[in-house]
Image (cartoon, rainbow, N blue to C red):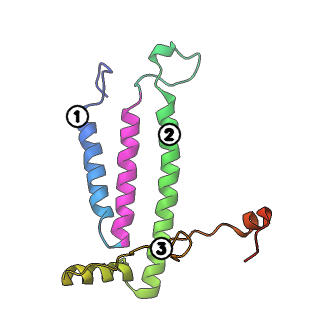
Amino acid sequence: MTASGAGPTLVLVLAVAVLVGCGVILLLERSLTRILLGVILLGNGVNLLILLGGRPGGAPIVGTGPTEQMSDPLPQAMVLTAIVITFGLAAFLLAVAYRSWYLTADDEVPDDLEDRQIIRRAVRNEVGTVDQGGEGPNGDPEQVDPEPARRRLRRGDEAC
């Protein structure tokens, strides 16, 4: 913060921008270790951004000074919560990366089968199959969302 308490300094704003930018770039990579580093950098950048949004001042303890000169405790509480969430997500991603390395000796995220089909169709300039309709509201199996069995039984309809 600036000496007068008017707002964040340019250095802190640039630090937020660099942390978030590098975190997003690392999140877009295929390697799970880079994704893990991206989550950590993005979490730290957002935490710094939340702290910059708070009011600077003294400790927010009642009785230590006038309330106008106390810092805002809400951003500090939000950052503590975000640190715990980021740590939990980082631990989960670390476990996934370890498991991937253990099973395949590689931590790269593979393409889905559907992604590969879409890429092949795009290369051949094909159009996917189009649902022409006309089956009625309950005739198209990929469009039907059946009701739960309990609701049907409550209404007195036939059971599945």
Residue wearing tag 1: 10
Residue wearing tag 2: 78
Magenta part of the protein: which range?
32-54
Q: Residue furthest bottom?
A: 104
Whichever of callouts 1 and 3 sits on the residue coming sooner in the sequence is 1
Q: Quadrant where the C terminus lies?
A: bottom right
Q: Could you tell whether 152 is left or right of 16 in the image? A: right
Residue 144, image quadrant: bottom right
Q: Is residue 43 above or below residue 51?
A: below
Whichever of callouts 2 and 1 sits on the residue coming sooner in the sequence is 1
Q: Magenta stretch: dominant SS?
A: helix
**Circle 1 sits in a helix, a strand or a loop, which is it?**
helix
What residue appears at the point 48 percent right and 20 percent down from the top-left corner?
70
Cα separation, mark 2 vs mark 1, equals 23 Å
Residue type for callout 2: Met
Percent position (x, y) of residue 32? 38, 71
Q: Residue furthest top?
A: 66
Residue wearing tag 3: 96
What residue appears at the point 46 percent right and 69 percent down from the top-left corner?
94
Compare residues 42 and 153 and report the one nearer the observer.
153
**Circle 2 sits in a helix, a strand or a loop, which is it?**
helix
Percent position (x, y) of residue 8? 30, 30
**Circle 3 sits in a helix, a strand or a loop, which is it?**
helix
Residue 57, image quadrant: top left
